[in-house]
Each structure stands twice: as C-alpha cells, then as structure tokens.
Amino acid sequence: MAPVAQVLSSESNGNATVGALGRRKDGKPLKVRSYPKFDTLEEERQYRKQHLAAAYRVFGERGFDEGVAGHISVRDPILRDHFWLNPLSIHFSQISVSDLILVDEEGTVVIGDEPINAAAFAIHSEIHKARPDVDAACHAHSVYGKAWSVFGKELDMMTQDSLRFWKDHAVYTQFNGIVLDREEGRRIAECLGGGKAVILQNHGLITVGQTIDAAAFWFLSLDKTCQAQLLVEAASGGSGIKRTIIPEEEAKFSYQQAGTPEKGWLAFQPYYDDILAKTNGSFLK
C-alpha cells in the first residue's frame, strides 16, 4: 500500500481543487493545503497524536461526548499494529497529546497510565486489523446519529453533502448490547467492508479514514447528514410532499469531488485551525 501522503498527493491532481481554480489570473499557482511530508516516522507520530487530540476537542465542542462512551483511534506509524486512543475517564474537551494511550493489538497498554474503554478496543482493534488501508476510526453516540440509527436504514442521497457517503456506508442491523466481545467487533468490521462509515442500529455511528483528519470530518458530516434526513422525514411525513433523490450519475460525480480521502483531510483543517485558536494550542502539550 502506498504511504498516506503519496495517496493523498496523487488524488489532488485530478479534482476541482487544482486546474483553472488552482492558479491566479497571472498564472501563479495558488497554495493548496495538503497532507504534510515528514522526515522521520517520529515526526509523523507526533502529527497524528496532535490531530487526534484536536479531533477529541472538536467532538467535545459539538456535544459528541456521553460519559465514558465514544472513542477515536489512530494507527501508530511506527508500530503499525498499535494504535492511540483516549483514556477511559477524561472528557473529550480536556484531552491533550500527553493523555493519549498507546495499546497493542491485544489491548495491552504500552504507553500511558490509565485504562482504555473496553468497547473501544473491541471495535477499533478489529477495524484496524480488517482494514490496513485505514489509519483512523471514530465512534460516538451523537444525538442525530443515534436517532437515525433506530431506523436501521442507509441514508438517502438527497443533499449534496450526503453524497460523500454515496455507496460508501453500511448499516449494522443487529444490536447485541454494549460491545465488549471482539467477535462483535469483527462483525462490525465485516459490515463496514471497504466503506468509510457504518451506522450501528440503536447505537451510533462509526467512520474511518486514511488520516485522523478525514475520519473525523466524515463523522462530523455524517452526523449532520443524519440530522438533515431526520428533518426531511419529519417535514414530509404524511404531507404528500415529494422528496427529490439525486440521480446516480450526478451522485457519482459529486462523490468523486467531495468523498475522496484527500478531500476529507482538507475539510478537517478549518476545524483544526479553529480549535487551535480557541484553546491557544493547549491540547498540544
């Protein structure tokens, strides 16, 4: 598999970000943000940890917390069968780089002094095993994600933003209680398949990505898409108003413009900048 930076860089050459819109009138190229290049794997490890901590802060700001439920993980670039995630009892809005826990593929803490969420390990370990192309995964009990999950249905492609998930999300239609069994994690990973998101019926949402940034943005967007669909369902129920579904050809084209790993990474950068400014970088410590 090509390195993440290489994959993201190659994708940026064939979309609407570059080309005519990528140059000034005088022909000078515009600066398009892209996944950074690192001199060492240690530098990339620190980058991933910083953006993981930022993702937790962003999730906390949006109310995606619920007690000790919810977790975001990122694969370690040096120890590829290890991943970083949150300690059990620190609120998302308080997590910093120094709080992050490194665990191995068996769930044993390698770096850190606190336990992890057992459900986090049961789900995330199996996703990381099943998807070597995925370096990050997000799961939280967001209100709109929970509400839509009750229907056990995929989302309709009826808004532009929903097209990020066109033929790229699934529904896990079983609820077997709190996920503590790794076999349940394997079934969830199997349901996810090669997609970027899975809706867990009666539970919540999971998104994955080649970067922590992409996985986090997919989650933010997926939850908003659930909110939009819930509003549409409520407004149209019994009213006789016809809902317009976006045709396949337009959906495919839009997905290629908005649903790629490179676009997911880029879309999270304003959130990173915002939380960096609001916290004065406190999560970097």
Image (cartoon, grey):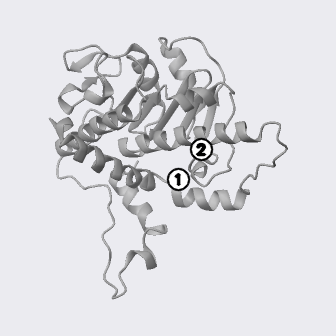
Where 265 falls versus 104 (above or below)? below
Where 134 falls versus 114 (above or below)? below
Residue 137 x, y percent position in the rendering: 42, 34
Residue 233 x, y percent position in the rendering: 72, 38
Tell me which residue sits at (53%, 28%) in the image.
143
Residue bearing the label numbered 2: 168
Q: CA distance from mark 1 to mark 2?
A: 9 Å
Q: Is residue 119 left or right of residue 24?
A: right
Residue 159 x, y percent position in the rendering: 63, 52
Where 39 falls versus 283 (above or below)? below
Callout 1: SS: loop
Query: In this figure, what is the number of numbered marks?
Result: 2
Residue bearing the label numbered 1: 259
Q: Quadrant of residue 134?
A: top left
Tell me which residue sits at (41%, 20%) in the image.
120
Labels 1 & 2 near each other (Cβ < 8 A): yes
For disc 2, the neighbor class at 10 Å (few under 14, some 14 to 19, many from 20) is some
Where 66 falls versus 236 (above or below)? above
Residue 124 x, y percent position in the rendering: 43, 26
Tell me which residue sits at (56%, 59%) in the image.
256
- Amino acid type at image mark 2: Asp
Residue positioned most to the right? 240
Q: Quadrant of residue 76?
A: top left
Q: Closer to the N terminus: mark 1 or mark 2?
A: 2
Tell me which residue sits at (49%, 67%) in the image.
15
- Amino acid type at image mark 1: Gly
Of residue 248 and residue 194, the one placed in the foreground of this image is 248
